[in-house]
Image (cartoon, rainbow, N blue to C red):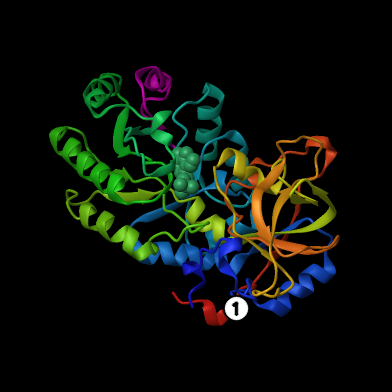
Amino acid sequence: MNKHMIAESFAEQSHPDALQEFDRESLENLVAKHETPFMVLDLSEVEYQYKSLQAALPGVKLFYALKALSHPELIKRLKSLGSSFDLATIGEVELVESLGIKGDQCIHSHPIKKDKEIKRALEFGCNRFVVDNIEELRKFIPYAGQVELIMRVSFRNQQAVVDLSRKFGCALEELPVMVDLAQKNGIEVVGLSFHVGSQSLSPMTQVNAVRASVAAMKVMHHVRWKFLDIGGSFPVSYQEAVLPIIDFCAPVMEALGELPEGIEVYAEPGRFIAAPSMIEVISVVGKAKRGAKMWYYMDDGVYGGFSGQMFDHAVYPLAPLKPFDATGEFFSSVLAGPTCDSIDVISEDIELPEMEVGDILIGKQMGAYTIASATEFNYYPKPKVIVVEDIFDPETEAL
Ligand SMILES: Cc1ncc(COP(=O)(O)O)c(C=O)c1O
């Protein structure tokens, strides 16, 4: 079985080994060695995801979006695989700089920036910036001749869990005025970009966005287009199975075939590379029967590694470390985080076998937008990240 096809909900899976995709010995050794809560970042999984996406998007240059997970070891592994990087802040610029990455391997994709952010990116050697409105474009007038601009267009997407085009991107009709202003001021416009939303469940918005961008480039033939940036959006399986990446990308590749000769294609994947690369190991600190439900208080929750349940709308698959009796009794339970806030609940209604204090649960697909948005509310430290290779069973890996 390919682990990427697994999308179980704990209550439904009723399989005694809910961790069959892992190398159990490695997992148990980690649990024996480290105090919970902790996250496990598997670099071989980072590599697997990167290669899977590159195979599904042949010829497309991948710029890993640091915002999903910015662990230096992940960045170093991607660098060694030839990845480029998508940056949005001075902090991200300084992180990749400290890891020996060059500015010309990066794009600055935040559509709204302070002047000091433009200056710092240029100082680093990154001269490709995204803009999506006239006001932003004017900020680049002092840098004419030094920068290459990519115009971000909005394509709303009801099939995306996080519809980023609600917040960023101009209408296609606004492009000619922006291009005109840039050209009048000697600023080079070289590309179009879009992000059709994160965790997009269908490729069709991306396909339509490619077609609309190609048409816009052809209409504005007086521009020397060099790039089309198709953003992120590539989905992973949480509770529901999503399309295998090769099938998701096939219609996108077909649409890209309509691009005029010589235009390079960029993508900015975050979630697809980061999410499957990390799990979180948490344990039961306390339990109480409250009404009809059993409440389990875990040592991490939505203020920590599970913060993506609040900000990213993700619900992570959970599995107990100990194999359980699939034919045994399950109880309607609540899984709560450790803080004193009542919003800190990982799952309000989950069917679980009875657990004891000290029992371990594994949260899967927890690499993207998790620790990146974790807080230290109540002075609980963020879970530490243990870096490993090959925690997944090699027999379940199939590129
Ligand atoms: C500009 C930009 N690029 C790339 C990404 C990464 O997107 P995803 O995680 O869907 O691949 C994001 C996510 O917010 C983004 O805002």
Q: Position of residue 232 (x, y in %)?
A: 42, 47
Q: Secondary structure at mark 1?
A: loop
| Residue in view at x 55 percent, y 56 percent | 275
Taking the magenta stretch, the answer to whether it contains residue 376 is: no
* Residue 301 can be seen, yes or no: yes
| Residue in view at x 32 percent, y 33 percent | 153
Q: Position of residue 370 (x, y in %)?
A: 63, 47
Taking the magenta stretch, the answer to whether it contains residue 131 is: yes
Side of 111 relative to 305 (left or right): left
Q: Is residue 164 above or below residue 31?
A: above
Label 1 CB less than 8 angstroms from ligand 1:
no
* Among the 4 quarters of the image, the one containing residue 172: top left
Numbered label tally = 1
Amino acid type, callout 1? Asp
In depth, the one of 311 and 214 nearer the eye is 311
Q: Is residue 33 above or below residue 192?
A: below
* Among the 4 quarters of the image, the one containing residue 210: top left
Q: Is residue 311 above or below residue 350?
A: above
Q: Position of residue 194 (x, y in %)?
A: 35, 39
In depth, the one of 53 and 316 nearer the eye is 316
Q: Position of residue 384 (x, y in %)?
A: 76, 54
* Residue 108 can be seen, yes or no: no
Q: Is residue 333 above or below residue 228?
A: below
Q: Which residues are magenta?
A: 125-146
* Among the 4 quarters of the image, the one containing residue 79: bottom right
Work out which residue is located at the far bottom of the displayed protein and give it.
395
Disc 1: which residue: 393
| Residue in view at x 40 percent, y 30 percent | 166
In depth, the one of 245 and 50 nearer the eye is 245
